[in-house]
Amino acid sequence: MLKVILHTTGKLREPWLQMALDEYSKRLTGEVTIETHLAKDETALEKTILKLDHVTLLDAKGTLMTSPEWSQFLYSEWEKRGSILTFAIGGANGFSSQVKGAFKMLSFSSMTFPHQIARLLFYEQTYRAIQIYKKGKYHK
């Protein structure tokens, strides 16, 4: 089973957002497990990230990817690194230059999103990536 560990800050405040995450988690069942680790603040998040060997940062200033490129990236990384990948979504102030300098940065958009919406985008795009890889009908 493939697994993603997602490090981020903040709790979900909107019930509809939790419902959407639950829906994508359900759709991913049997394909990928996403395990979310919440840090109490940006400082704690960065301390945790800097202790890890390999993390991919999701940041508006990262390399932009299309959905098919994201799918290719995920499967390529799972092949190279094994069945567990680690990602991080920064807080309101983004990542410090120290963290940005230590890890690869990707972006789903050059727009800035609240971390809660970024988390939902991550789940949805991961589901879409699986469907692209399997040639499912979800991605048109």
Image (spheres, rainbow, N blue to C red):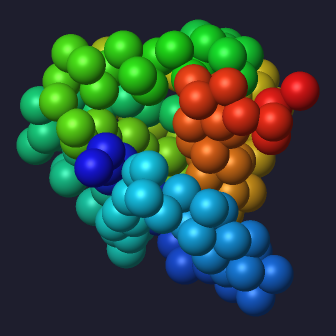
- Which is more toward the observer, 49 or 32? 32
Residue 26: x and y in percent read 58, 70
Q: Dividing the picture into quarters, in which one does residue 24 lie? A: bottom right
Residue 32: x and y in percent read 42, 51
> Which residue occupies the extreme bottom position in the image?
15
Quarter the C terminus occupies: top right
Regarding residue 91, the answer to whether it shows in the image is yes
Q: Is residue 80 left or right of residue 115?
A: left
The answer to whether 73 is drawn above or below residue 19 in the figure is above
Q: Is residue 49 left or right of residue 41?
A: left
- Which is more toward the observer, 64 or 34? 34
Q: Dividing the picture into quarters, in which one does residue 69 lie? A: top right
Q: Is residue 102 left or right of residue 4?
A: left
Residue drawn at x 50%, y 46% is 90
- Which is more toward the observer, 136 or 21? 136
Residue 27: x and y in percent read 62, 61
Regarding residue 118, the answer to whether it shows in the image is no
Q: Dividing the picture into quarters, in which one does residue 55 lie? A: top left
The answer to whether 138 is drawn above or below residue 66 in the figure is below
> Which residue occupies the extreme right position in the image?
140
